[in-house]
Image (cartoon, grey):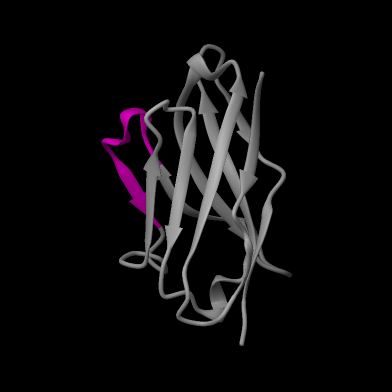
Amino acid sequence: QVQLVESGGGLVQPGGSLRLSCAASGSIFSIATMGWYRQAPGKQRELVATVTSGGRTTTYANSVKGRFTISRGNAKNTVYLRMNSLVPEDTAVYYCYAQALQPREDYWGQGTQVTVSS
C-alpha cells in the first residue's frame, strides 16, 4: 500500500505562482511514475503532468506546457509541481498520483484545492 499526501494549494491571483508537493509513504519501493491530475467543477479529471522514476521523462498537458514544471525529489518518494503564470482556468482540485509496480496499482492523494482568482 502507498499513501499520498499533498500540500501547497491555495488562492492565487492570475499571473501568480504556486508549488504543490506530494509525499508518498508505505511501499514506496514499488513506485514508478508519479504525477498530478486535476478536476474542475463539472469536468472530468484530467492529466496535468507525469514524471518517471529518476525524473528522466516528463509529460505535460498541452494547456500547461511552458508554465508548469514537474519534478521528483531526491528521495524519489516525493513529487513537485511548480505552477507559473496561473490563469483562472487552472482552478481545480489537484490530485497526486503514483503508479506502483509489483503489484501494478494506482494510488491517489486526497486532493488540494487551487483557486486562481482576482
| 15 within the magenta span | no
User: Outermost residue toward the top?
Assistant: 102
**Residue 61 position by quadrant:** bottom left
Which residue is depicted at the point 36% across and 67% down?
A: 67
Which residue is depicted at the point 66% across and 40% down?
A: 109
* In the rendered image, the vertical position of residue 78 relative to residue 7, given as above or below: above
Answer left or right for 12 relative to 61.
right
Answer left or right for 60 relative to 95.
left
Answer left or right for 71 relative to 86.
left
Q: Nearer the viewer, residue 64 or 104?
A: 64
Which residue is depicted at the point 55% across and 71% down?
A: 90
* In the rendered image, the vertical position of residue 53 relative to residue 87, given as above or below: above
Number of numbered discs visible in the structure rendering = 0
| 56 within the magenta span | yes
Q: Position of residue 88 (x, y in %)?
A: 57, 80
* In the rendered image, the vertical position of residue 31 relative to residue 34, given as above or below: above
Which residue is depicted at the point 35% across and 49% down?
A: 59
Q: Position of residue 92 (x, y in %)?
A: 64, 65
Q: Nearer the viewer, residue 20 or 39?
A: 20
**Residue 11 position by quadrant:** bottom right
Which stretch is magenta?
51-60
Q: Position of residue 35 (x, y in %)?
A: 48, 43
Q: Quadrant of the N terminus?
A: top right
